[in-house]
Image (tube, rainbow, N blue to C red):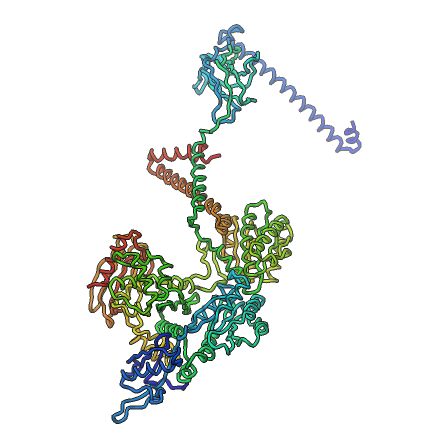
């Protein structure tokens, strides 16, 4: 009404709106009639089909029979677990027949069985409780529903069909789930672990016995002496940047290990060490580390706490401050040890410009090329992490390092063997090569081995 | 000293005043060429009862004069100079110039200091050694000694002079002054004469010179020269070396008995013997454009000299003194350092270890004895191989590129980052190996000298071998400062006895496999064939002869052209000839004693070391 009033008030425009409104109402009415017609048609089709089906099977309500029961119901503890699952298996009901034909034969008798119900109870309880369902053609089920380790369980399997349910068939004996000591399905993982851990232990024993373990020389770490020496001769500072991440990052931890070595050398040479940090916790750790190193060198008097300071958490704010410091003080030795991102090249280029010997170490693959190009020496990934073992020379660390090498060699040789076998199999179609590939995929490299 | 025109020098008398003997040689211009003609020797008389070094010089010169039929010393016991031409019935007399070196009384002994042991202290050590000194100790900020220990050490030593370095120009002042403050209270006493002031050369940070001067009092004669490392990228050893020579004459020599007279006699400054040897080797390397290694093995010490191209392509001279490696006083130390099994591996017959130990101790307590039996000779030469090998290892570790230098990298260096301070001694680039010292120079056969050099130094590629005939290098070193042409001519013609050329393949040798193929063509020999790994063979090629060789190494072996690449060279003959060595480098001997013995015996037979 309001609209119409508005139409009258607004002349021709109001009249047009009214006509349009009426058109919409007619259209709506047509739709409703159309829907009603569709519903009646579908109802007729359904009834027709029902009568046809009843006539076709010749069966009425009295033709619906329940399926025949299953047999040989067995329940066993699920292997390789902590005792919280039970495996139930049975022989399929005689009415459970597979229908393998792609297009159902309209003349075929429909199956009396639609699936199985698995029920459970504990001895002494009156009734079984449904714990799971399984589809037709499935003869096993793993019960993981609130199974308590050490408690006995009885299982019953019932075949279910359109005609109702069969008689339930129970397990003869109660099954008690227990904890498995070994996961026999992960045997290869055990072998691999034994090999690597065994190698680590063996090398530690060898190292402790006094035999010298060969560790490849890492020029970057050996050059630390040279860099600190340069700073000493030139009367300038050594600058140590422990990355821009916090102390919970493993690269920062590795960097702090190298810092300890650098601090020992600056204490020995009598050079000044400066450590700007971008995290307060790193600053605290660095202070403790450097103080300990100076004490160990017998130079606690030379330790200057103020030279290890916090700048800012902000990435580029930190970099701007450090580079500005570098331009002003022109350190003769710069160490970049930790996690770096975009700032790597900015720092390294500035250090190069002021003529410093620079040693960098990071496990960030994307930053390595920048460090390699702009620094004198770079510790690459693993070398960086091996630094503490290399520097300390402790038997335990050296043995671990060599043991890990054995693990790497194992992985590398598996890769090589796998690649060669797969290539050979695809080129020649060799069955034995294929067998090797399959074996590796299913065992060593599969869930039994490396796959988690 | 007389300033003489080199063109007018025809007769030169040169002496080397050693600790035991004074050796004099006469060099004469014959047919337009300088030749060493006569040699004489007399005991050095620096000690009591004579206590005048010139007496030994006169004795040695007299002997030379008698041999030459030329009077060199007049009735007053003075050298006759200049030459008096032959007159009627009178032979020519005297010499044009007289020059001398000296190592009497233990030579020049120095204490060296620096800030960082591997940087300025190492440079100072190089300067001192290059000047012919024996470095008694190196004091540095990082030598891991406490200050009181350092002071104690300085007090214990009685050096002839001290060389102080440290800091680049504009670099650390604190460290340099701190070291000066260690030396000043220690008041080191000079070895000779308590009346004179200890010479101290300061060659460090020029900005610290004033403060260093303030630290020392009148007990020290301080002289300031240019910094030895003005920047870490460059070494400037010249001024410090020159000052060492000056002070050696002014202070050390002047206080030794008779040296004031000797200094007045000589026409060129007296040089420390090893410094003179270094000078002549540098002259030869420069003149021929080659890399040279020289060795002088003595009873107590072994000196190794080398001239190799440095990182910038300019030749770099290095000298090391292995103070505990020698053939008599230090023989026990050689055996202890290398171990008796290492010595025995060079012996091709069974030897009782007890007997060996007796030999070693006898040699130590009777240093002048020489081997009387074949067994003794073989054993002595086995010890010499080990002494030379150890001395050369020390030399390689010392002769390095400068440390503390900024490196320029590219991404291509990712997996091949070379550390600074790499040895510049590269056996593949070695052209000439010169031997001197009793056990090498006086070996009964030249083949033995050549074998000792090859086994100890393991030259790679094509290397000429030579020995100093009568240890003339010191005389020629000092002559080079007066008359370089004469020095070079005598060095080539009379000083060096060329043993021949060694062609050795670098690579790990697996016994029996082919190492390289050779083709030798020349006037006396035309041979071709194959060398199996583990073989060594000698081809006669006399001193005046040369031959063209073509070597085609097997895969993995390098004879100078690169792994597996053939080379063509002209090689020089010598007393021994041409030696083809396919034993591989590094040279490895079997650990099993029987295998080792049979192999060494075969090598000895092939080179005809001890029997025809």
Tell me how many marks there are. Answer: 0
- Residue at 22%, 66% (x, y): give it: B540
Determine whether B474 is above or below B122 in the image: below
Using the rendered image of the protein, determine whether residue A422 is visible from the camera's viewpoint.
yes
Quadrant holding the N terminus of chain A: top right
Q: Position of residue A292 (x, y in %)?
A: 58, 52
**Residue nearest the observer in this picture, B546 or A198:** A198
Q: Position of residue B436 (x, y in %)?
A: 33, 70
Q: Residue furthest top?
A: A62
Q: Residue furthest front?
A: B49
Q: Position of residue A437 (x, y in %)?
A: 38, 35
**Residue nearest the observer in this picture, A145 or B567:** A145
Determine whether B13 is above or below B176 in the image: below
**Residue nearest the observer in this picture, B201 or A382:** B201
Please give left or right for residue A382 compared with residue B213 in the image: left
Using the rendered image of the protein, determine whether residue B432 is visible from the camera's viewpoint.
no
Determine whether A54 is above or below B157 in the image: above
Q: Quadrant of residue B85?
A: bottom left
Please give left or right for residue B70 compared with residue A236 in the image: left
Q: Position of residue B262 (x, y in %)?
A: 40, 82
């Amino acid at each position: 009404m309001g609209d119409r009033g508005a139409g009258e008030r607004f002349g021709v425009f109001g009249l047009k709106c009214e006509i349009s409104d009426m058109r919409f109402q007619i259209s709506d009415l047509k739709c409703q009639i159309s829907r009603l017609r569709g519903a009646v048609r579908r109802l007729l089709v359904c009834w027709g089909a029902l009568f046809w089906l009843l006539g076709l099977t010749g069966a009425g309500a009295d033709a619906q029979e329940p399926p025949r029961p299953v047999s040989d119901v067995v329940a066993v503890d699920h292997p390789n677990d902590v005792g919280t699952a039970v495996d139930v298996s049975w022989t399929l009901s005689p009415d459970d027949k597979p229908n393998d034909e792609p297009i159902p034969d309209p003349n075929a008798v429909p199956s009396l069985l639609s699936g199985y119900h698995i029920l459970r109870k504990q001895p002494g309880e009156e009734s079984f409780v449904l714990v799971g369902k399984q589809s037709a053609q499935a003869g096993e089920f793993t019960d993981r529903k609130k199974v308590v380790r050490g408690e006995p369980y009885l299982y019953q399997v019932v075949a279910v069909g359109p005609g109702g349910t069969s008689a339930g068939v129970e397990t003869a004996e109660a099954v008690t789930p227990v904890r498995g000591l070994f996961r026999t399905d992960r045997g290869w993982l055990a072998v691999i672990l034994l090999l690597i851990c065994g190698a680590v232990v063996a090398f530690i024993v060898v190292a402790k016995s006094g035999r010298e373990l060969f560790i490849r020389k890492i020029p970057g770490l050996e050059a630390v002496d040279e860099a600190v020496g340069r700073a000493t001769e030139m009367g300038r500072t050594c600058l140590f940047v422990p990355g821009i991440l916090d102390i919970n990052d493993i690269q920062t931890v590795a960097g702090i290990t190298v810092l300890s070595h650098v601090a020992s050398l600056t204490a020995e040479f009598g050079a000044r060490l400066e450590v700007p940090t971008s995290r307060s916790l790193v600053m605290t750790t660095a202070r403790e580390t450097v103080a300990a190193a100076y004490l160990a060198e017998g130079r606690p008097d030379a330790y200057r706490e103020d030279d290890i300071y916090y700048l800012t958490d902000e990435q580029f704010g930190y970099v701007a401050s450090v580079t500005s410091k570098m331009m002003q003080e022109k350190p003769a030795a710069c160490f970049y040890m930790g996690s770096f991102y975009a700032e790597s090249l900015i720092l390294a280029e500035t250090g190069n410009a002021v003529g410093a010997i620079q040693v960098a170490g990071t496990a960030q693959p994307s930053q390595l090329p920048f460090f390699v190009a702009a620094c004198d020496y770079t510790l690459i990934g693993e070398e960086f992490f091996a630094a503490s073992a290399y520097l300390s020379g402790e038997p335990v660390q050296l043995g671990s390092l060599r043991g890990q090498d054995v693990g790497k060699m194992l992985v590398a040789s598996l890769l090589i063997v796998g690649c060669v076998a797969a290539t050979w199999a695809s080129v020649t179609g060799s069955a034995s090569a294929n067998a090797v590939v399959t074996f590796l995929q299913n065992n060593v490299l599969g869930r039994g081995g490396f796959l988690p | 000293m007389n300033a003489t025109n080199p063109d007018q020098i025809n007769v030169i008398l040169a002496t080397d005043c050693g600790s035991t003997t004074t050796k004099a040689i006469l060099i004469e211009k014959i047919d337009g060429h300088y030749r060493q003609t006569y040699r004489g020797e007399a005991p050095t008389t620096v000690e009591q009862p004579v206590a005048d070094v010139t007496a030994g010089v006169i004795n040695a010169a007299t002997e030379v004069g008698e041999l030459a039929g030329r009077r060199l010393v007049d009735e007053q016991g003075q050298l006759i100079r200049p030459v008096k031409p032959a007159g009627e019935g009178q032979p020519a007399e005297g010499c044009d110039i007289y020059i001398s070196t000296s190592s009497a009384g233990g030579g020049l002994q120095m204490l060296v200091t620096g800030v960082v042991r591997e940087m300025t202290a190492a440079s100072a050590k190089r300067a001192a050694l290059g000047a012919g000194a024996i470095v008694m100790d190196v004091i540095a900020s990082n030598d891991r000694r406490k200050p009181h220990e350092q002071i104690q050490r300085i007090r214990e030593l009685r050096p002839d002079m001290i060389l102080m370095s440290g800091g680049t120009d504009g670099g650390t002042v604190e460290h340099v002054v701190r070291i000066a403050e260690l030396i000043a209270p220690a008041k080191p006493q000079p070895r000779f004469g308590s009346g004179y002031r200890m010479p101290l050369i300061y060659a460090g940070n020029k900005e610290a010179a004033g403060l260093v001067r303030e630290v020392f009092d009148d007990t020290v004669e301080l002289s300031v020269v240019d910094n030895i490392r003005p920047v870490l990228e460059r070494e400037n050893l010249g001024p410090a070396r020159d000052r060492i020579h000056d002070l050696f004459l002014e202070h050390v020599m002047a206080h030794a008995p008779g040296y004031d007279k000797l200094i007045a006699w000589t026409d060129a400054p007296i040089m420390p013997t090893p410094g003179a040897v270094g000078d002549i080797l540098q002259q030869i390397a420069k003149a021929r454009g080659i890399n040279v290694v020289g060795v002088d093995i003595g009873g107590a010490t072994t000196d190794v000299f080398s001239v190799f191209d440095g990182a910038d392509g300019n030749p770099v001279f290095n000298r090391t003194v292995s103070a505990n490696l020698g053939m008599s006083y230090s023989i026990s130390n050689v055996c202890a350092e290398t171990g008796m099994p290492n010595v025995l591996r060079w012996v091709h017959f069974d030897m009782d270890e007890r007997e060996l130990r007796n030999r070693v101790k006898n040699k130590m307590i009777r240093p002048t004895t020489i081997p009387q039996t074949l067994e003794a000779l073989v054993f002595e030469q086995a010890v010499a191989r080990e002494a030379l090998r150890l001395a050369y290892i020390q030399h390689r570790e010392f002769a390095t590129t400068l440390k503390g230098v900024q490196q320029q990298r590219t991404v291509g260096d990712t997996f091949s980052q070379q550390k600074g301070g790499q040895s510049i001694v590269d056996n593949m680039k070695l052209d000439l190996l010169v031997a001197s010292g009793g056990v090498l120079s006086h070996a009964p056969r030249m083949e033995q000298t050549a074998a000792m050099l090859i086994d100890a130094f393991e030259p790679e590629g094509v290397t000429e071998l030579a020995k100093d005939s009568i240890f003339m290098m010191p005389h020629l070193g000092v002559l080079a400062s007066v008359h370089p042409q004469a020095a070079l001519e005598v060095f080539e013609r009379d000083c060096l006895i060329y043993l021949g050329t060694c062609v050795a393949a670098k690579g790990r040798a697996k016994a029996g496999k082919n190492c390289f193929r050779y083709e030798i063509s020349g006037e006396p020999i035309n041979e071709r064939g194959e060398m199996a790994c583990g073989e060594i063979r000698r081809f006669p090629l006399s001193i005046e002869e040369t031959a063209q060789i073509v070597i085609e190494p097997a895969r993995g072996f390098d004879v100078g052209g690169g792994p597996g690449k053939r080379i063509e060279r002209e090689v020089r003959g010598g007393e021994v000839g041409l030696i083809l060595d396919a034993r591989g480098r590094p040279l490895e001997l079997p650990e099993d004693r029987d295998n080792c013995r049979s192999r060494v015996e075969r090598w000895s037979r092939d080179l005809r070391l001890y029997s025809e």
